[in-house]
Image: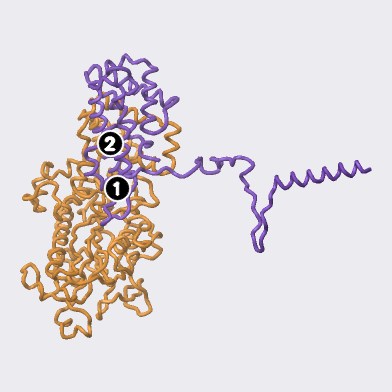
Chain colours: A orange, B purple
């Protein structure tokens, strides 16, 4: 990964704060020109970005990252293998092939070491940036528990999350100078040990995001607005300080400061794809021409992630990219179609990040780590309703900066896709080894950026680290 | 001698009677615990030393929930924030489907939306009060007598009274000292500008917005 010279991309904290304080006047004063901020802030993407992509509902690994050969795992052998790929059930839809997907070899990269399920589709073409971790023991079949386990890398207490989200942990440690360090788009976010600066901007949709980033539609007279800003900037009283001294007040004041900087930058304009300067290209690239604001499709959400990273607005974006995967009663085709929506959107995002140059050199994927996960997997056998139930053994995919490319770590068992045991230092199967747990993956993500992973209390999966 | 013995007996009887009245002892039973004296009976218990507790006494402040915010706005400003329900989830309300507990973190989204809400209710209420001649029917200017006229003409005492009344309404605590002076200055300066603009309501609105976006309004 190419390093960004820190002096070029990171404006000094004092410069940024000075500019932010001054710029509070610009938008709040009804559009008074305030060029100093624009000159001083020099918004730039961080040297290292992260995207956490959540597939909601529990995904079928046979269709995604842990496929099986249907010629080997046949219905005749199902009592022996306890695995039924069911790819033939997709034959009615031409979008899906009925065999595991091996992407075409890329020149200079070599053939793919990763086999993909039929639902992955075009995303498989980016195999040259991927590591797939298979055979992860989720230790739970509860949606909230598995989801929060993967978000934090810590086994929840009951269903209540423990610790901070990985994105919060990253921005808490890295303290990026971007205006909104972390965005959580329709996904939970936790912060248990960092200041308000590490809080994710948590929104349930693009409309919320734009509303949050836009100046209020109701403005006082510009002079009175200025008086209000000056007033808010004055030293606080003892009583106010007493209320603010422990947590809530300080966090709130930090949030208000963040709000000022965000609005000063008019960041909302970047997410109004229908009116943004380079919107034409973006709308076409993500296929949003026929959609209306707030572009809440998976592709629209992917465009939001790309914009947040490319414009230097955020360092971490966590996003719920697709759902409808809890198909106990659905068909294989339904599940594959819902997965495909997410994978196609993710493929667009990776395409976009690969085609865009990063100011620090290379393209954005050279500076971005993507983690794709779900709360657990689905049973390798099809139930009496034609769907699949919850299964402990799952997979996840890491992609981009800091991780090895075109690589598979771990595997699930050939009988019932049970989670295996491995020597985690080498990745080799070892009957006396240990399971792979979500905390191992989270530790690996943190270690890939040379961050402190001690909160996970495990070692990272070192063979994955680039 | 006989007189002396009689006096002693009378004293003894009187002493026994008095003792039985003052301290009637309960009948003790086998295995019964001995009574414990109330350690606080003699004198009031002093509050903990703030210095020994990081400068604080009592629990840490908490942010109000969305339901509390809704009621607070209605109570102190006298009208509802029209967009509160549509933004409730982003403000932290649990939906009890995917999110089982209310998020009371005063994060960026909360700060921004509260600012939007304060502007809406304060500006609408201030504008409405301009046409209300009866002070008792006003909320943001109840202590100003008669119809709202040129706010620059209010005496310093009247402005101070107004600020104290408003702060008590918004925070449950009256302003005093330097902070009261700061608020008086804010109102006075805004009143001068508002009069120039012929928008008197903005002087009331700016104080309302400042108080509603203060951390004391959202904590308890």
Horizontal relation, residue A174 to residue B126: left or right: right
Mark 2 or 1, nearer chain start = 1
Q: Residues within 10 Å of mark 2 (few under 14, many from 20)?
A: many
Please name whichever residue, A6 or A122, is drawn nearer the observer in this view of the structure: A122
Element marked by disc 1: loop
Q: Nearer the viewer, mark 2 or mark 1?
A: 1
Question: Which image quarter: residue A257?
Answer: top left
- x and y percentages locating residue A283 in the rendered image: 9, 49
Per the image, the residue denoted by label 2 is: B115
Per the image, the residue denoted by label 1 is: B92
Q: Residue furthest top?
A: B153
Please name whichever residue, A299 or A252, is drawn nearer the observer in this view of the structure: A252
Above or below, comparing residue A114 to residue B203 in the picture: below
- Residue drawn at x 18%, y 54% is A353
Horizontal relation, residue A373 to residue B169: left or right: left
State whether discs 2 and 1 lie on one chain. yes
Please name whichever residue, A428 or B128, is drawn nearer the observer in this view of the structure: B128
- x and y percentages locating residue B205 in the rendered image: 28, 27
Above or below, comparing residue A259 to residue A89 in the picture: above
- Residue drawn at x 16%, y 60% is A342
Q: Residues within 10 Å of mark 1 (few under 14, many from 20)?
A: many
């Amino acid at each position: 990964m190419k390093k960004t010279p820190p002096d070029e991309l990171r404006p000094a904290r004092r410069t940024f704060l000075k500019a932010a304080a001054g710029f509070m006047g610009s938008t709040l004063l009804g559009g008074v020109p305030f060029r100093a901020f624009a000159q001083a802030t020099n918004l730039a993407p961080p040297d290292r970005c992260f995207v956490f992509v959540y597939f909601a509902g529990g995904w079928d690994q046979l269709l995604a990252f842990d496929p099986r050969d249907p010629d080997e795992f046949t219905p005749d052998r199902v009592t022996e293998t306890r695995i039924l790929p069911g790819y033939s059930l997709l034959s009615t839809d031409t979008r899906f092939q009925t065999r595991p997907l091996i992407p075409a070899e890329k020149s200079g990269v070599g053939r793919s070491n990763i086999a993909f399920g039929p639902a992955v589709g075009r995303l498989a073409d980016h195999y040259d940036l991927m590591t797939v971790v298979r055979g992860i023991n989720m230790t739970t079949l509860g949606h909230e528990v598995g989801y929060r386990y993967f978000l934090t890398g810590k086994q929840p207490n009951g269903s209540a999350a423990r610790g901070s989200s990985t994105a919060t942990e990253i921005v808490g440690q890295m303290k990026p100078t971007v205006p909104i360090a972390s965005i959580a788009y329709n996904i939970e976010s936790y912060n248990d040990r960092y200041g308000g600066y590490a809080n994710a901007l948590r929104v349930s949709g693009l409309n919320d995001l734009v509303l949050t980033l836009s100046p209020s539609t109701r403005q006082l007279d510009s002079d009175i607005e200025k008086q209000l800003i000056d007033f808010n900037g004055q030293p606080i009283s003892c009583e106010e300080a007493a209320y603010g001294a422990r947590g809530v007040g300080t966090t709130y004041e930090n949030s208000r400061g963040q709000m000022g900087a965000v609005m000063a930058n008019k960041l909302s304009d970047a997410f109004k794809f229908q009116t943004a300067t380079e919107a034409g290209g973006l709308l076409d690239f993500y296929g949003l021409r026929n959609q209306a604001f707030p572009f809440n499709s998976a592709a629209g959400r992917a465009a939001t992630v790309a914009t947040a990273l490319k414009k230097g607005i955020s360092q971490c974006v966590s996003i719920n990219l697709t759902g409808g995967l809890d198909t106990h009663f659905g068909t294989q085709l339904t599940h594959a179609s819902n997965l495909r929506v997410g994978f196609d959107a993710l493929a667009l995002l990776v395409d976009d990040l690969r085609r865009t140059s990063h100011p620090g050199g290379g393209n954005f994927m050279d500076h971005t780590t993507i983690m794709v996960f779900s709360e657990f997997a689905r049973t390798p056998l099809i139930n009496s309703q034609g769907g699949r139930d919850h299964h402990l053994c799952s997979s996840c995919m890491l992609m981009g900066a800091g991780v090895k490319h075109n690589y598979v770590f771990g595997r699930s068992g050939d009988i019932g896709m049970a989670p295996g045991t491995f020597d985690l230092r080498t990745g080799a199967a070892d009957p006396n080894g240990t399971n792979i747990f979500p905390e191992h993956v989270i530790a690996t993500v943190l270690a890939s950026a040379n961050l402190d992973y001690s909160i996970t209390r495990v070692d990272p999966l070192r063979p994955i680290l680039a | 001698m006989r007189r002396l013995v009689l006096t002693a007996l009378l004293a003894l009887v009187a002493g026994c009677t008095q003792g039985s009245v003052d301290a009637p002892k309960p009948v003790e039973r086998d295995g019964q615990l001995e009574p414990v004296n109330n350690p606080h009976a003699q004198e009031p218990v002093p509050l903990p030393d703030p210095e020994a507790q990081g400068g604080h006494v009592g629990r840490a402040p908490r942010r109000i929930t969305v339901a509390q915010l809704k009621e607070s706005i209605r109570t102190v400003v006298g009208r509802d924030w029209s967009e509160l329900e549509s933004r409730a989830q982003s403000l932290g309300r649990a939906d009890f489907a995917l999110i089982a507990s209310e998020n009371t973190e005063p994060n960026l989204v909360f700060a921004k939306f509260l600012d939007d809400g304060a502007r809406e209710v304060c500006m609408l209420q201030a504008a409405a009060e301009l046409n209300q001649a009866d002070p008792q029917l006003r909320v943001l200017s109840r202590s100003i007598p008669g119809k709202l006229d040129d706010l620059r003409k209010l005496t310093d005492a009247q402005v101070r009274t107004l600020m104290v009344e408003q702060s008590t309404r918004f925070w449950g605590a009256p302003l005093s000292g330097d902070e009261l002076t700061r608020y008086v200055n804010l109102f006075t300066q805004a009143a001068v500008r508002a009069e120039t603009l012929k928008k008197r309501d903005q002087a009331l609105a700016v104080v309302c917005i400042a108080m509603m976006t203060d951390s004391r309004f959202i904590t308890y």
